Image (cartoon, rainbow, N blue to C red):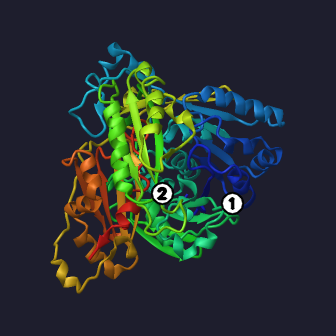
Amino acid sequence: MLDRPPIRIGNVSGATGDHPHAMSRMVRSGNVHVITGDWLSEMNIAWNAITKQECLDDIMQRDIRVVTNAGALNTDALYDKVRALCEKRGYADCVVAKVLGDDVSDVIMDRERRRDVQITHLDHPEESLESWGFTPCCATAYIGCWGIVQALRSGARIVICGRCTDASPVMGAAAWYHGWREDQYEELAGSLLAAHLIECGPYVVGANFSGLKDFLPELLDIAFPIAEIDPRGQCTIGRTAEGGGRVMKKTVTAQLLYELQGHLYLNPDVVADLSGVHVEQESENRVSVSGVRGLPPPPTAKVMIAAKGGFQAEATFYINGLDVYEKAAMMKNQPAHMFKDSNFSRLSIELYGTPAENPTSQQAGTVSLRVFAQARRKEDIDAPKFKVPIYALRMQSYPGYHMNLDFRTMVPKPFMEMFPALMPVSAVEHRVEMSNGASHRIEPPTKIAKYPIVRPSTETHGPVDMLTFGPTEWAPLGSVVHARSGDKGDNSNVGFFVRNDDEYAWLRNLLTVSKLKHLFGDDWFKGDPERRVERVEFPGINAVHFRVLDNLNGGVASSDRIDGLGKGIGEYLRSRLKG
C-alpha cells in the first residue's frame, strides 16, 4: 500500500454555522476523496448545501465520502434525515452509517453506575464530580476514529457521528483509505496533525492570522483547506481553487499552535509527539508538515460533563468625551452599590477600550462599560432584580450617559457549567449502525500507555543574557512575533513564533513564564495569580508555546468575559510594548 497515492480530504466547516457554500465548492473544485466538517449541529446551514440536487449528485457521481460530527446529541435524528434525503433524491442504495457511543449521560447522571467508573477531572485530579456543586444533565465522550473506519470499510458513503474528537473524521478517512492498523502510530499521528490543521476550516488559509497585513486584499471569501495524507501519514496542506486567502508556512504554523496542550497531543487512538515537528513551503498554496512521532493511546477518553449553571443577564453603557475614567468610576459605583445585597453568584463591571485623543468622531472617542451578572436561580436575576434597577440608573448617571437600547440582553438567559473529565475508554460503548442493517461494536485499543495529567513545563534551555542580542528599542512584541491563541475549556493556550530562524534564540530567551505573566499585565491579576502556566518549545517551527490553566473564568459556557474563548489573548500580548 506504500505506493498508493495520497488521500485528499477537504474540510468544509470549522464550526457550527460555517460558510454555506463550502460544501458545493469543495465538491466542485476540490478533487477530493472525502469531505469532512466540524459542525456539531444537525441544523447547521452547511448541511443545507447537501440538499441541493447538484451537490448530492456530484458527491455520488464522484464517489466522494462524507464524514461529519453534525449528529451532536441527536445523531439518530440526523441519520434518519440524511437517509430520507438520499431516498428522495434517488439514492436509496446509498449506505449511511451512524457512529454512536459518545453520549454517556446515563453513566454520569446515575450515581450508582458512575461509582464503578473512575471519573477524574481533566486538569485537576484533586477535584471530584461529587464536590463540583452542580447536578450533571448531560455528558459526552470524545470518541476516536475506528467507528468511522469500520463504517467506511463496510461500504458507507455518508457517516454521521456525534461528539467524536475533532480529528476523528480525518483520521478515520485516512486509516480507511490506506488500510492502517490500530498500532500504526506514526501514520495515525501524522493524520491526527493533518486533521488538526484543517479542522478549523479557513484558519489555515489565512483567517485568524496575525500577519493579515501582508495579503489583506486576498482575505475575502476565504477558501477551505485540503489535506493530502500519504501512506506514511505525512501530510501536505492545500486549498480549494475558489476563494481567497493563502496556504503559507506562516498560516500553517499558526494553526499548528492553535489550542495545543503542549508537546503531546492526546487522542483516544494515538498520542502525537509534536516536539520535532517541521513545516515547509513546497510551492504556492502547498505546505508540507513532518517530524511527528506516534505513541500508544491513553487508557482514557475525554468527557465533557454539563450542568445547568443558572441564569445570566447584562447591560452595556457607552462613555465618551472628557474625564472618561472618572465617568466610568461613577458608573461602576452605581450598580456595585445597587446590587450589594443581591443573590448574584457573579457580578462583573468592566470597562472596555481606550478613548482616542482628540477624536475626529464621537464613535472614535467612545468606550463601553459592561455590567454582567449571574445567579443560580432565575428569580434572583429577573426584571425586578436586574433590568429595573439598571434602567433606573439613567437619571442619576454620568454626563453624556447612553446605553445599548437592546434591552433583551437584560432578560435572564440560562447558561451551562462544564466539568471536563477523563473516563476509561473501556466504559464507552463505541458502535456503528448501518442503513444496510449491519452493526459493529468497536473494541477499545489493545495497547495503551499512561501519561501524566499535569503536563511537563520547561523554561529556556541554556538561557543567555538578553543584552547579548544587541541594542533594543521600544516596540510592540507583534512587530516581530506572530501569535495564535485559543481555549480548551477554562484553559487558554497561546503560541508565539518568529518569521526568521535567526530570531528564534532571542524569542525563546525572552519568553519565559515570568515574562508571559508580565505581558498579561492587569489581566494576570483578574484570576488566581498562582494559576499554573506550562511552557514548551518547538524549535522546528521557531515557536514557544504556553498553556495557562483556569484562565477564562469558567470558559465559553459560563465565562463573564467578552472573549470567553481566549481568541484575542494572543493579539493582546502581541500589542504589548517590549524594549
How far apart marks 1 and 2 lie (CA) works out to 45 Å
- Asked whether residue 522 appears in the rendered view, the answer is yes
- Which disc number belongs to residue 30? 1
Amino acid residing under circle 1: Gly
Q: Quadrant of the N terminus?
A: bottom right
Residue at numbered disc 2: 366
* Relative side of 214 to 293, left or right: right
Residue sitting at 69 percent across and 66 percent down? 241
Residue sitting at 24 percent across and 37 percent down? 124
Q: Position of residue 445 (x, y in %)?
A: 39, 38
The answer to which of 114 and 121 lies nearer the viewer is 121
Q: Position of residue 160 (x, y in %)?
A: 61, 36
Q: Nearer the viewer, mark 1 or mark 2?
A: 2
Q: Quadrant of the C terminus?
A: bottom left
Up the image or down, 570 lies above or below 24; here it is below
Amino acid residing under circle 2: Thr
Tell me the quarter of the picture where residue 557 sits.
top left
